Amino acid sequence: MEPLANHSDRMTKAEAKNAIKTIKANASSLMEKCYDFATREGYLALGYASFKECITNELATVISYDYAHKMKNAGEVHMIIAPDTPMGSIAESVLRPLHRLPDDQKKVVWDQTVQECGDVTKVTADIAKNVIKSMGLEKPTANRKSKADSNKQAENDLKNDSPSGVIPNPQLQERLQQSALEIIKAFIIDNGSQYDSKDNFEAALQFTVDNLFSFLAEQYDSLYGK
């Protein structure tokens, strides 16, 4: 992104807060629309055999399939744990840890998580993960795994999390995570805190990551010398 020619064009704090609010509102609406489109099989009405085929063909320049898949999954969890609340009122990142659990356990974990927080608005993904762990619902891991076994388990976990079934590279993911963390830390040092809550930070981060995904996907030919 090109830097602004002068500071007078920069957003005011009020404009920035409104922009974040809009992004969050759109994200909430997107969860509901992806869930509704998938469960009511809207893709069939457009002549596609699957949700994935439809999204990759119709919305490739708008959102990635992986993101749409996460929103759909979040909608499924939401309808199990809080069907009477507006979809999108609970962030996708908070719902994500519950998705792997059997349906009957999702509600139990959610109720326990809210009880520990005292307020549904205070629930975070980390708290939900801790509750899952405390209830003994984490995936069991064998002791004394060799490095090769650990790497294989990491690959399997990544494959299970990948809606496309493609095996991501654990080493690449780790390097990207470390690089992203350093970049964000440097940005905060240079620019100060830009977000007044974790939800705002997550919404802006998701928007940024989606744009980064689209940019890198377009570089495939140059990266692989096609």
Image: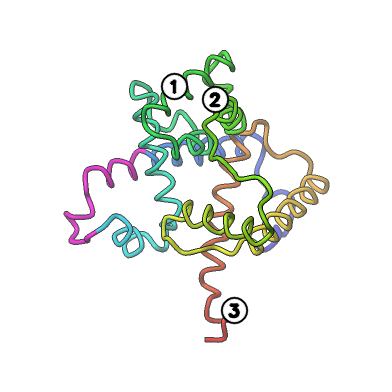
The residue identified by callout 1 is 108
Q: Residue furthest front?
A: 144
Q: Are the residues tagged 2 and 3 within 8 Å (C-beta)?
A: no
The residue identified by callout 3 is 223
Q: State yes or no: residue 34 in magenta.
A: yes
Q: Position of residue 102 (x, y in %)?
A: 39, 34
Q: Earlier in the sequence, mark 2 or mark 3?
A: 2
Give the SS element for disc 2: loop
Per the rendered image, the range of residues in magenta is 32-49
Relative to residue 29, is residue 212 depicted above or below? below
Q: Earlier in the sequence, mark 3 or mark 1?
A: 1
Q: Position of residue 194 (x, y in %)?
A: 70, 40
Q: Quadrant of residue 163?
A: bottom left
Colour scheme shown: rainbow
Between circles 2 and 3, the one closer to the viewer is 2
Name the residue located 42 percent from the left edge and 39 percent from the top edge.
74
Q: Which amino acid, mark 1? A: Val
The residue identified by callout 2 is 135
Give the SS element for disc 3: helix
Pick whichever, 219 or 192, lies toward us.
219
Q: Which amino acid, mark 3? A: Leu
Between circles 1 and 2, the one closer to the viewer is 2
Give the SS element for disc 1: helix
- Left or right of 181 in this view: 94: left
- Left or right of 86 in this view: 152: right
Q: Are the residues tagged 1 and 2 within 8 Å (C-beta)?
A: yes
- Left or right of 102 in this view: 41: left
